[in-house]
Image (tube, rainbow, N blue to C red):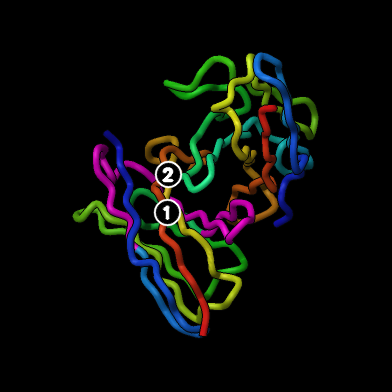
């Protein structure tokens, strides 16, 4: 199955807000409210940050928020901190495959 | 504390086989579907396989179907991935992950193990 489309990189200064987009189709992002976001620091395992478009797991900072419009989901990080510098991956349920989850290609966030 | 610990990675020749294990602790293993996700060096995440909580249903990416087999032993709280006919493109860090919800094969994964590296090279 085709990966969801994310920008390769985004950047922002401490204290600013940034948004990472994740574009799919009506068979995945646009058709279902099952978008998740993961944070991955170098050499570490991915960590769930958002599930079901906009829900935060316990322990995840409220500076992280998710939304969706049409076939595009977004992750917004407000009040950027140095520790937010990492790779971010979106994923979505997909009806296009028997393995019902597809990932985005990942976005490298740089905190300037 | 929920913990997932992978093992079994290593160097294998093209065409060879390897079995990965994922030892789970800190939760009722038999209540959760489990997943394998891999990441090739410097690349993104690729969903590989999933198994239902009782092991009765399994799912595979097209890229590994017919070569990999996912299984679990709920009495040992352990998830497995038997990999065969390995190719250079299978080289990756393999992560096991717990499903985000109990008793269904869901669409988000939490938590993830630390990963185990599989190197395919002659």
Report the residue at 69% width, 40% height from top: A107
Q: Residue A45 at what x, y percent from top left?
A: 47, 45
Location of residue B63 with respect to A40 vertically, above or below? below
Quarter of the image for residue A53 reads top right
> How many neighbours does mark 1 have within 10 angstroms: few (below 14), some (14-19), or many (20 or more)?
many
Report the residue at 72% width, 31% height from top: A20
Span shown in magenta: B21-48
Return the residue at label 2. B112
Q: Dot 2 lies on which element?
A: strand
Q: Is residue B47 magenta?
A: yes
The quarter of the picture where the N terminus of chain B appears is top left
User: Disc 1 vs disc 2: Cβ atoms closer than 8 Å?
Assistant: yes
Q: Is residue B100 left or right of residue A21?
A: left
Question: Residue furthest toward the left?
Answer: B75
Location of residue A110 with respect to A93 vertically, above or below? above
A12 or A6, which lies in front? A12
Report the residue at 53% width, 40% height from top: A41
Q: Residue A82 at what x, y percent from top left?
A: 58, 25
B109 or A44, which lies in front? A44
Distance CA(mark 1)–CA(mark 2) = 8 Å
Return the residue at label 1. B115
> How many neighbours does mark 2 have within 10 angstroms: few (below 14), some (14-19), or many (20 or more)?
many
Location of residue A68 with respect to B5 vertically, above or below? above
A88 or B51, which lies in front? A88
| Residue B109 visible in image | yes
> Please, which chain is the residue tagged with disc 1 on?
B
> Please, which chain is the residue tagged with disc 2 on?
B
Q: Is residue B74 magenta?
A: no
**Front tag of 1 and 2:** 1
Q: Dot 1 lies on which element?
A: loop
Q: Is residue B69 left or right of residue A66?
A: left
């Amino acid at each position: 199955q085709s990966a969801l489309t994310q920008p390769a990189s985004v950047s922002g200064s401490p204290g600013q807000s940034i948004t990472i987009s994740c574009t799919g189709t009506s068979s995945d992002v646009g058709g279902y409210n099952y978008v998740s976001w993961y944070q991955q620091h170098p050499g570490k395992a991915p960590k769930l940050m958002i599930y079901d478009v906009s829900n935060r797991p316990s322990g995840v900072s409220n500076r992280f928020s998710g939304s969706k419009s049409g076939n595009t989901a977004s992750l917004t990080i407000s009040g950027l901190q140095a520790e937010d510098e990492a790779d971010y991956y979106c994923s979505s349920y997909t009806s296009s495959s028997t393995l019902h989850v597809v990932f985005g290609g990942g976005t490298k966030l740089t905190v300037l | 504390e929920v913990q997932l610990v992978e093992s079994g990675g290593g160097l294998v020749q093209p065409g060879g086989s390897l079995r990965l294990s994922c030892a789970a602790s800190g939760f009722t293993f038999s209540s959760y579907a489990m997943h394998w996700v891999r990441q090739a060096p410097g690349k993104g995440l690729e969903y590989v396989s999933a198994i239902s909580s009782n092991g009765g249903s399994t799912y595979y990416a097209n890229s590994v179907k017919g070569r990999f087999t996912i299984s679990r032993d709920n009495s040992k709280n352990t998830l497995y991935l038997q990999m065969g006919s390995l190719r250079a493109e299978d080289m990756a860090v393999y992560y096991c992950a717990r499903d985000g919800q109990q008793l269904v094969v869901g669409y988000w994964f939490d938590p993830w193990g630390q990963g185990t590296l599989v190197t395919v090279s002659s």
